[in-house]
Structures are given as C-alpha cells and as structure tokens.
C-alpha cells in the first residue's frame, strides 16, 4: 500500500482535495510544501510527461510514494493550445481572466467563433513508488467554450467551459456537481480502483 504518500503540489487547495478523495483508503498524505520539496521545471511535452516528472521527483526527494497531477484546457481549433501550457498562459500572477481573453482573441484571429468552439479538459494523475516507477491515469471531459466568462465557482478556465449535456459553465456549477463529472474525478476513479486492487492483493 502507498501510505504515507506525498502529493507533489504546493497548492494547499489541491492537496486538501486529494486528501479528501483518498480518505476512504486511510492513506496518510503529506504535501511537497510541507516536506520542503522544490517544484521541478515542467519540461515534458505531454500531460503524462509532466505529471510523471513531478511524481518521480517528489518520490525520490521524499523517499516515499508520490502523487502528482498535470491538467489543462485543450482547444482543437488552436492546435490544442493552451494544453500543457494552460497555467503558463495565465502568467506569474495566475491571471486567468487574461488567459481566457487570450483564448477568445486567438480563436477570432483564427476565424473561429469563440462561443461554441469545441474544447476539453484533461487531467493526468501520476503515481510513483519510492523507486521512481510511475503509473498514469488520464481523465477527460469534453464540451464547448462560451464567452463572456460566467460563474465564480471553480478556478482557472472553469467560467468559459460548458460540459457536454449541460448548459451551465464549470464556474456556475456547485463544487459537488462539478467534482462528479470533471476530468480530475474521472482520473481519480481509475487511481482509486488501482489502489484498491493493490490494497486487496
């Protein structure tokens, strides 16, 4: 079993969310910040690359199993941008209002009507053992973009994303509703299934 586990993130909210999702498995969770682990440079070319890089780095640094995630918004009409650069589009100040405006502007420049453009969120969770062996779990949720942004729930690009089958943005959804269908939730179902199997073995 992978207890204790370090979450390779300095984001307190993300660590808390992961801790809650893992609670039924009775896994002791630590954060990278709590253990004074540095944040590695994300040099990968895919979500899987970056999640694995972060998980392996934390596992080797802490000498315990580690979990990392890499996630972002993919817009096919923009050659899959912002993709793995989703956080970087928001800049050092994490200004997602500017990042959302950039998506709208670049879609218009490409001759695409921004509202209604196809998009999807990706989350890849990477689980590394103490030796640096990594397993990845990928979740996606597809939908369309809408402008102007709507809703104050969630974070990042949530206010411009409408999932298939819904007419409200992730930013307008109650957190429990979003967590039930999100890309991160889908990846977590796979992760927990794997951990449960290992626990039973």
Image (cartoon, rainbow, N blue to C red):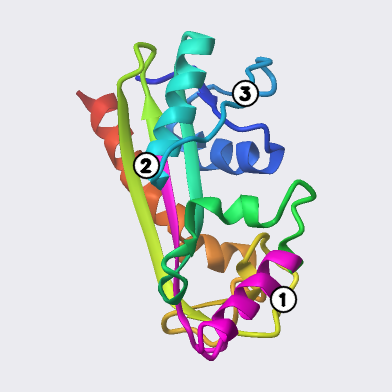
- The earlier-in-sequence mark between 1 and 3 is 3
Vertical arrangement, residue 198 with respect to residue 115, above or below? above
Q: Secondary structure at mark 2?
A: helix
The span picked out in magenta is 98-125
Crowdedness near tag 1: few (<14), some (14–19) or many (≥20) residues, C-alpha within 10 Å: some
Instruction: From the image, state whether disc 1 or disc 2 is nearer to you.
Output: 2
Q: Position of residue 164 (x, y in %)?
A: 42, 80
Q: Position of residue 58 (x, y in %)?
A: 51, 20
Vertical arrangement, residue 187 with respect to residue 179, above or below? above
Judge by depth and name the residue closer to the eye, 150 or 147: 147
The residue lying furthest to the left in this view is 201
**Would you say 174 lies left or right of 190 here?**
right
Identify the residue under disc 1: 151
Q: Position of residue 15 (x, y in %)?
A: 62, 36
* C-alpha distance separating marks 1 and 2: 30 Å
Identify the residue under disc 2: 48
**Would you say 5 lies left or right of 138 here?**
right
x 29%, y 25%: residue: 199
Identify the residue under disc 3: 32
* C-alpha distance separating marks 1 and 3: 31 Å
Q: Which mark is residue 75?
A: none
Q: Position of residue 69 (x, y in %)?
A: 48, 41
Q: Secondary structure at mark 3?
A: loop
């Amino acid at each position: 079993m992978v207890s204790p586990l370090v979450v390779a993130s300095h984001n307190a909210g993300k660590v808390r969310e992961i801790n809650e999702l893992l609670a039924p498995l009775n896994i002791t969770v630590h954060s990278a910040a709590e253990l004074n682990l540095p944040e590695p440079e994300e040099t990968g070319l895919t979500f899987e690359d970056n999640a694995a890089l972060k998980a392996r780095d934390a596992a080797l640094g802490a000498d315990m199993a580690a979990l990392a995630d890499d996630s972002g918004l993919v817009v096919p009409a923009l050659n899959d941008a912002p993709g793995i650069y989703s956080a970087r589009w928001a800049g050092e100040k994490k200004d997602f209002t500017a990042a959302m405006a950039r998506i709208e502007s670049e879609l218009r420049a490409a001759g695409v009507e921004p509202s209604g453009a196809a998009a999807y969120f990706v989350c890849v969770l990477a689980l590394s053992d103490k030796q640096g062996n990594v397993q990845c779990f990928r979740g996606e949720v597809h939908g369309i973009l809408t402008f102007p942004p709507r809703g104050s729930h969630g974070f990042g690009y949530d206010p411009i994303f409408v999932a298939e089958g819904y007419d409200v943005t992730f930013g307008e959804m109650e957190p429990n509703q979003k967590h039930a269908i999100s890309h991160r939730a889908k990846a977590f179902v796979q992760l927990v299934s794997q951990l449960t199997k290992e626990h039973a073995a």
